[in-house]
Image (cartoon, rainbow, N blue to C red):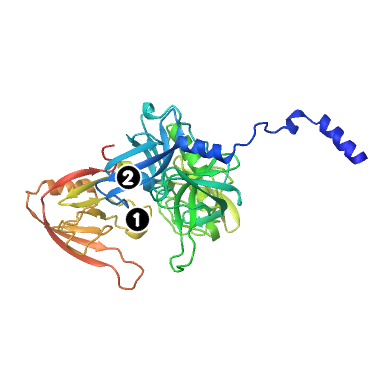
Amino acid sequence: MRLKFALFIALLTAPAQALSADPRPAKAPEEILADAERYTVKIAVQTTIGLRNDERGQSSGTGFLIDRARGWILTNAHVASRSPGRITVAFKDGEPTAAKRVHVDAFMDVAILSVPLEQIPASAVPAKLECSGLPSSGASVFAYGHPSGLDFTASRGIVSGASWFSPFILVQTDATINAGNSGGPLIRVSDGLVVGVSSHSYKDSEDENATAVGLAQPVPPICHLLELLKQGRDAHTKLLPVDIATGRNGREPTVASFADGTSLLPGDRIVSVNGSTAVATYPDLLDRLRGASQPVKVGVKRGGVAIEVLSPLRTVPDPLQHQAINISGVIISEPWRADNAEVDPLGSLVVVDFDTESDLGASDAQASDRLMYVNGRSFAKIGDLYEYLDGLKDGAELEMIFWQVPGYKEFSGGRIVTRMHKSKLEWVSAAGTE
């Protein structure tokens, strides 16, 4: 009895703030989904020429409003694409409206679109993002979007955990994520905050009885990217000029190669960037490098001794500034892969797409082939190739020799020669007319 009385007195005398941390009642699931219906959009893309990994044709996905004042909509990079074509968004019960690409980060599979403010419905509300950290395992979540053509629908599950899919740690969930969900919000049921951007599902291709798991891009690094954009700063992915090896689940990022211009050495374990001590994984490293200025101060452990070294940075090219040329139905550009220095140290121009009815379409060549020679000449810059081709007469014969990058099979890869005639020459802009 004395214990109960003492507890009663303690409650009476406790500070009011401690007694009521949040007087607002939690939203019911129905209310959370009603909000999602107001901020989620359906995205439709018509791609006329496929650059990088984009494919020609029509596709669709999901996005959601994150900044009403700027008209910003968040989605996946593979939904927004990076190629010429038309992209539209539609709110629930609204008409499709043309959108523009503000930022596309294919490395992180994130894109920000913008729509005219007057096209945003009065009832629309921006989604609230959970920027403070990853969601806890076991948290109930909704995956909201347009799976398999079923518009503005939700599936429910839990956060299974954080899974390593190089180069990122992704939020894993058993909430069903199908084609059409990509770019949509993964919403925590307890408070309605968006904790991830649904990106794809994963299934072991060798086990036909396996059940696919859903994967989503975590929100905290996206919040960092958004803050940089709002400040007008460079938000593109930056990398150290060395290869990075990782331990289990992306932990202990370690220098795996040597490059001129940096004091980093193979075996250096990276523990900080510009004084930050929060570099435990490779995703941590990428997040700390985003927005950093040249040169960057890198803290490493070398032989058990903690030291700091200066290193330059290399920026992953902006896909919206990517340019290619269309020569007789063959689309050629400068290399764009983040690991191109390893794949092709010479930096050869690369085929990114071609018309199937072109001369190249009738050969054994394929997208991703490297252009070695045109009429016996080699070209490292797309502008130089355009200038040479522009000087040739229409109908001139072109002998192109390509190199197919070897795969994992022994003796794979090889050289291919194709002869075609100059019938078209034009620049192709990655962003297109939006």
**Badge 1, how many Cα within 10 Å: few under 14, some, many 20+?**
few
Quadrant position of residue 354: bottom left
Q: Residue at x 9, y 49 (%)?
A: 392
Residue 232 location, x and y as percent? 42, 32
Location of residue 198 with respect to 346 vertically, above or below: above
Q: Nearer the viewer, mark 2 or mark 1?
A: 2
**Residue at 16% across, 50% down:** 327
> For residue 82, which numbered disc appears in the image?
2
Q: Amino acid at mark 1?
A: Asn
Q: Are marks 2 and 1 in contact (CB under 8 Å)?
A: no
Callout 2, which amino acid?
Arg
Q: Quick one: quadrant of the N terminus?
A: top right
Residue indicated by mark 1:
340
Q: Position of residue 331 (x, y in %)?
A: 22, 51
Instruction: Check the image and report above or below for 85 versus 161.
Output: above
Q: Secondary structure at mark 1?
A: helix
Give the quadrant of residue 229.
top left
Left or right side of 4 for 311: left
